[in-house]
Amino acid sequence: MNTTQILNPTRPIWPGFSSSKSLCGDANCMEQLLLHCAKAIESNDATLAQQIIWVLNNLASPDGDSTQRLASSFLRALISRAASKSPAFAFLSLAATASVSQKMLHRFSVIELAEFVDLTPWHRFGFIAANAAILDAVEGYSSVHIVDLRLTHCMQIPTLIDSMANKLHKQPPPLLKLTVIASDAESHPPPLLGISYEELGSKLVNFATTRNIAMEFRIISSSYSDGLSSLIEQLRIDPFVFNEALVVNCHMMLHYIPDETLTSNPLRSVFLKELRDLNPTIVTVIDEDSDFTSTNFISRLRSLYNYMWIPYDTADMFLTRGSEHRQWYEADISWKIDNVVAKEGAERVERLEPKSRWLERMREAKFAGVGFGDTAGTEVKTMLEEHATGWGMKKDVEDDDDVERFVLTWKGHSVVFASAWAPINGVADLI
Amino acid sequence: MPVDLDNSSTVSGDASVSSTGNQNQTPKSVGKKKRNLPGMPDPDAEVIALSPKTLMATNRFVCEICNKGFQRDQNLQLHRRGHNLPWKLRQRSSKEVRKKVYVCPVSGCVHHDPSRALGDLTGIKKHFCRKHGEKKFKCEKCSKKYAVQSDWKAHAKICGTKEYKCDCGTLFSRRDSFITHRAFCDALAEESAKNHTQSKKLYPENVKRKNPEFEHKSPPVVESSPSLPPSSPPSVALAPAPAISVESEPVKIISSSVLPIQNSPESPENNNHPEVIIEEASRTIGFNVSSSDLSNDHSKYAGLFVSSTASPSLYASSTASPSLFAPSSSLEPISLRLSTNPSLFGPTIQDPPHFLTPLPPQPAMSATALLQKAAQMGSTGSGGSLLRGLGIVSTTSSSMELSNHDALSLAPGLGLGLPCSSGGSGSGLKELMMGNSSVFGPKQTTLDFLGLGRAVGNGGNTGGGLSALLTSIGGGGGIDLFGSGEFSGKDIGRSS
């Protein structure tokens, strides 16, 4: 076997390596290699690690097909992890410096970002579902206060404003208040916004005005690492406004609140409970459906691999090679991979939890699920049709509460889930 | 059966080629589908690997009696009924069907690996065609090529049918991407009164008609068209589009403000305007706006405006009644100018002093209607807001957003709220305006967003440098064990 020529013959022969041809174009094989490499790193076995890295380096390439690019990101992240882990891997430090750093991420202008979020349904799916739920919930209120916790910098809001303007044209449209969190640019996960939030807000207000909706915009500085405590504080002291709906939209950001694997303080649950105490009208929770919280590095890597192949695969479908969009897109994914693989402790912010766990948390915090409705489903499907085929949506009904939740799928594999919640009010249980 | 089962194995575990190992029946719970881990199909499912020929064969189901082929199993069943088989032979084998998942026959493909198999035969067929097949179908309109006919048809349906065009020229096929873009697009700031159909009709020559689709949507946001000022007053008065663009400036609150209505139909002289405006303002709004104050301010502005109609740009703390907004131009003859944060408006095209060109008088709105509107506004909004709103946003920062396309129609109604670079006049009003900022507003300090801050940082150029580094680790790629040639082989159909 070819592999034995490079490697010490006493090394285990990986299964499936029957011939060099089928060797490593194969995704599974890449995965095995990466896992072996990870194990070598974890056990400080520099020699083996070096060998595997060498192999991987030949196989993976940032310009190859989706598997190769995926492996390439992983490799980079692994190298970075190794280099910072122990002096045994000092030989990797040169390569490690090339790993994706915050500075290398593209800073999007608003228009670019608007375009970017629509490249795939990844975000738009959540937007549509959440907007539908929000609109249903806020009907009849004269004032709507949206707390937008979102990765994509308020990109959902224009369509929300538009729908509000259209659907509520019979009555005077409500006053719209938007609260966002000031993100610390240094540590904010991609995509990064190139303009300040103030500017963003003013554009939104302008737009709202053009649709006859009066709007206010405010920025609160708060940090995910402490469970958004200052946000909660601020919301608590907000003056009560009659007939105002409080909407909390959590889109891909809740997982940045540290979970129990990082701190013993159950910040996520605490945040959700405090949210519940504010008696919001509706809370939407949209996030990526995977589990990156395992403390065991190897299993974390495995989950990561089994999830991250999706964005690379979709990129292959629609983003032309070498295009800027693809570069940015993949840089963002690489950042995430790097974060999960190479970072530890407080730096590792991508602590995704699977849908089932989030649902549990919401229930523990005394929220009851709210369905999305058929129009939302149709809208999502229509939207998906305009993207590469391969995207799909399934409606999941959980055993406990019979509420449909939407899950975006790529080739049948779950990608993003969307759910809507309202507080359980004493006796009147489910809505 | 013509189906070749090249390789049938279970999905779980390593991708070793083995015969169907586990005969565990897939534990299908009644009613609920077993959820698989993301990224991994059901581990107990049977993996079917078909050869390309078989995969693409159209008639996989064959009647054993007459050897006729069918595309679907149901069709075959229907056909078999026609043979009048005795009951026994009619029964299908009752063994429980194992869930089948399919792999792509092309080695090296992501879906070639059993752990990435797809559960749907049609899915794998389509995948195979799309990724590895030849693209035989081409859309005539945009020359996009497709390998799967249904993809091609689906595309042809939407290609060119729905098109939304933003003012800046970008085309969108989907409404939501269009809306999202438009909300942030600079061009929004430059829109003339799309709502003002009246003005458009009347003063077509000056209207920069950006996009007929949006007429009903956008009210004349603030726009100023520098080009107007030079024109003579009468024609200026005829200037169509409303919007006075307010220049950017430190506003604490970003909120929408309502601009009062345009002035009366006739085109007043410059001098008359201030008074007219003021009067109307006080009349319609019923606030105690001292005419003197207004006139002072206004006179300052008057000089700025070629024509007299000055549409106030107000920074109200968003309590403006929606009724003042002119949603559909066709419906509301009054052109309302909403001034919003000036920072939104497009790049400053002219020097600050030029500011606003007058908006054309809106002929349709009668005084009574104006009054009604004002009453509505007054009732829905908080009391002071309008007054505040009337306050001019005087900006300390200098730039005025002017767009040279659209004529500004300065609403003579309340002749305030002009962005004016000279700080002095507006300051008092600014206090007024700012005074009530209950809500937090961003402080506008920069005007940069104008260019929409084209990416400040460099785009990710992670790719090139890294690969170079990596190759250097790998010893310069001297020994190419696996041969890059191998990979290129995999790239069948991956181009583009």
Image: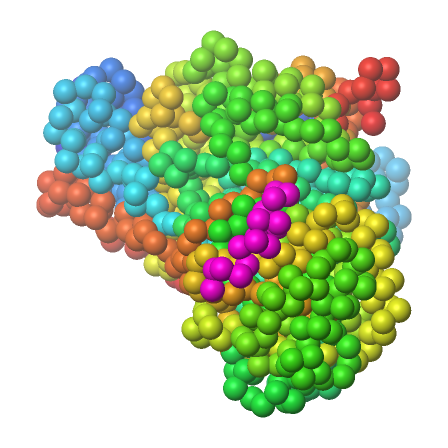
Q: Residue at x 59, y 27 (%)?
A: A234
Query: Seen in the image, is A347 located left or right of residue B480?
Result: right
Residue A364 lies, in percent from the top left, at 67, 15
Q: Quadrant of residue B327?
A: bottom right
Give above or below for A38 relative to A54.
above
Residue B144 visible in the shown view: no
User: Toward the viewer: A27 or B185?
Assistant: B185
Q: In the image, B124: left or right of B494?
A: right
Residue visible at 75% across and 64% down in the picture? B281
The structure residue drawn at horizontal position 65% and vertical position 89%, both measured from the top left corner, is B234
Is residue A274 visible to us here?
yes
List x then y, in percent, for residue A128: 67, 46
Along the line of sight, the residue nearer the viewer: A346 or A49: A346
Image quadrant of residue B407?
bottom right
Locate residue A156 relative to residue A397 in the image: left or right.
left
Q: Position of residue A159 (x, y in %)?
A: 66, 52
Residue A25 located left or right of residue B224: left
Segment tinted magenta in the rendering: B422-437
- Label the magenta part by its dominant secondary structure: helix
